[in-house]
């Protein structure tokens, strides 16, 4: 009889755990949403994998094609604002040109939408994307120089990881 009670308790706990896990997954979906930027970043991840695959098989044409895709995507990513920064920004997306035309920061305190702190974080994001684009340009220029490619890939990995940690919204 005790064994049946233990089994029923375990079954109930397992079922409750699965239901709660489903709710947290639902909460994640409701809290975080897929964005054009997240889809673009997923594509960049795939392009980087394609580059590494081409590199390992000495496919210089494949390497250059993947590098071109990565460069185009890194430039496009600059036109988006990470979801993490949008919480403090009820205004529409700002283009690179709009940022450049903002001029001095004097009017920032009275500007509706993006706070000064969020603006500064967004500028860090844009600078990070510029750094990534520079690394990708170096990667493309490295051609098939294995030593140089490996070094640059390491830098890209390190940069991407730190940038991802800084700008990825914690939805859990």
Image (cartoon, rainbow, N blue to C red):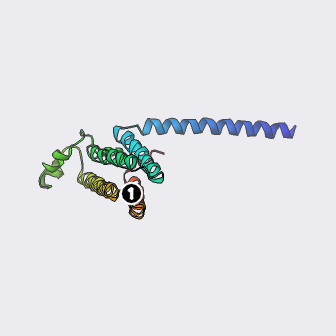
Q: Position of residue 49 (x, y in %)?
A: 45, 48
* Left or right of 52 in this view: 2: right
Residue shown at 16%/46% (left/top)?
A: 97
Which quarter of the picture shows residue 171? Answer: top left
Note whether 132 is above or below 98 in the view shown. below
For the question of whether residue 56 can be seen, the reply is: yes
Residue 87, visible in the rendered structure: no
Q: Position of residue 64 (x, y in %)?
A: 35, 49
Secondary structure at badge 1 equals: loop
Residue 10 higher or lower than 118, as above or below: above
In which quarter of the view is residue 139 placed?
bottom left
Which one is in front, 39 or 155?
A: 155
> Quick one: label 1, few (<14), some, or many (20+) residues within 10 Å?
some
Outermost residue, right side: 1
Relative side of 37 to 95, left or right = right
Give coordinates of residue 93: x percent, y percent: 25, 40
Which residue is labeled 1 in the image?
A: 144
Q: Residue at x 35, y 45 (%)?
A: 65
| Viewer-nearest residue: 168 or 78 | 78
Which quadrant is home to the N terminus? top right
Identify the residue at image location x=24%, y=52%.
119
How many dots with numbers? 1
At which x and y percent is residue 120? 25, 55
């Amino acid at each position: 009889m005790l064994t049946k009670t233990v089994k029923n308790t375990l079954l109930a706990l397992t079922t409750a755990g699965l239901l709660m896990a489903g709710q947290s997954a639902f909460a994640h979906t409701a809290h975080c949403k897929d964005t054009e930027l997240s889809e673009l970043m997923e594509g960049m991840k795939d392009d980087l994998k394609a580059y590494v695959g081409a590199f390992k098989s000495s496919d210089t044409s494949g390497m250059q094609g993947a590098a071109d895709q990565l460069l185009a995507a890194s430039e496009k990513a600059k036109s988006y604002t990470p979801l993490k920064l949008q919480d403090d920004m009820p205004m529409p997306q700002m283009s690179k040109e709009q940022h450049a035309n903002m001029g001095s920061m004097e009017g920032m305190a009275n500007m509706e939408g993006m706070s000064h702190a969020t603006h500064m974080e967004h500028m860090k994001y844009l600078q990070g994307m510029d750094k990534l684009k520079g690394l990708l340009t170096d990667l493309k220029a490295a051609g098939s120089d294995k030593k140089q490619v490996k070094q640059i890939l390491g830098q890209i990995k390190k940069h991407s990881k730190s940038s991802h940690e800084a700008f990825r919204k914690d939805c859990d």
